[in-house]
Amino acid sequence: KSRDWGEAQLHVSADWCVDIPFWQGVVFLWLNFHTVHHLFPKVDFSHHPEITRILRKTCKEFNIPYAVGSPFQIYKEMINSFSKPHSLMQEIMVYAGAI
C-alpha cells in the first residue's frame, strides 16, 4: 500500500539507463529518468541524474522499491500491461491509495 502520493509515483513509474552519462541520454530524449519526471515535472531535466541519486538513497533508507530496468524490459512490460484491463484498475487503485 502506498503511504503517500510520492510513493504511488514510484509504484507506477520506472527508469532505465540512469547510470549512463547525461549526454548519452539524448538517445531516450532524457525520458530514462521517468520516475523523477513524475515526482518533479517542472524541474529541468539536467538535474534529473542528481535527483535520481538522492531518490535511490531515500528509497533505500525507507525500504521503498525503486524500479530500474533495461529499455527493452520496460517496453515489454508496458506493452504487456496495455493488454490487461486489470492493469488500468491497478493504476487507479495506486492513485487512490489502496495499494
Image (tube, rainbow, N blue to C red):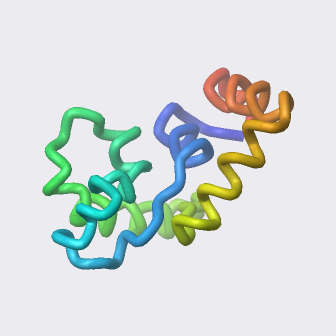
Question: Residue at position x 61%, y 46% from top?
Answer: 11
Q: Please indicate, yes or no, whether residue 13 appears anywhere in the rendered image.
A: yes
Q: Please indicate, yes or no, whether residue 68 appears anywhere in the rendered image.
A: no
Question: Residue at position x 20%, y 70% from top?
Answer: 22
Residue 24 picture location, percent across and down: 24, 72
Q: Is residue 83 above or below residue 58?
A: above
Question: Residue at position x 84%, y 36% from top?
Answer: 84
Question: Residue at position x 78%, y 35% from top?
Answer: 87
Residue 73 picture location, percent across and down: 64, 66
Residue 21 picture location, percent across and down: 22, 77
Q: Is residue 21 left or right of residue 58?
A: left
Pick the residue in front: 61 or 36.
Answer: 36
Quadrant position of the C terminus in the picture: top right
Query: Residue 44, located in which quarter of the rendered image?
Result: top left
Q: Is residue 67 above or below residue 44?
A: below
Q: Is residue 69 left or right of residue 76?
A: left
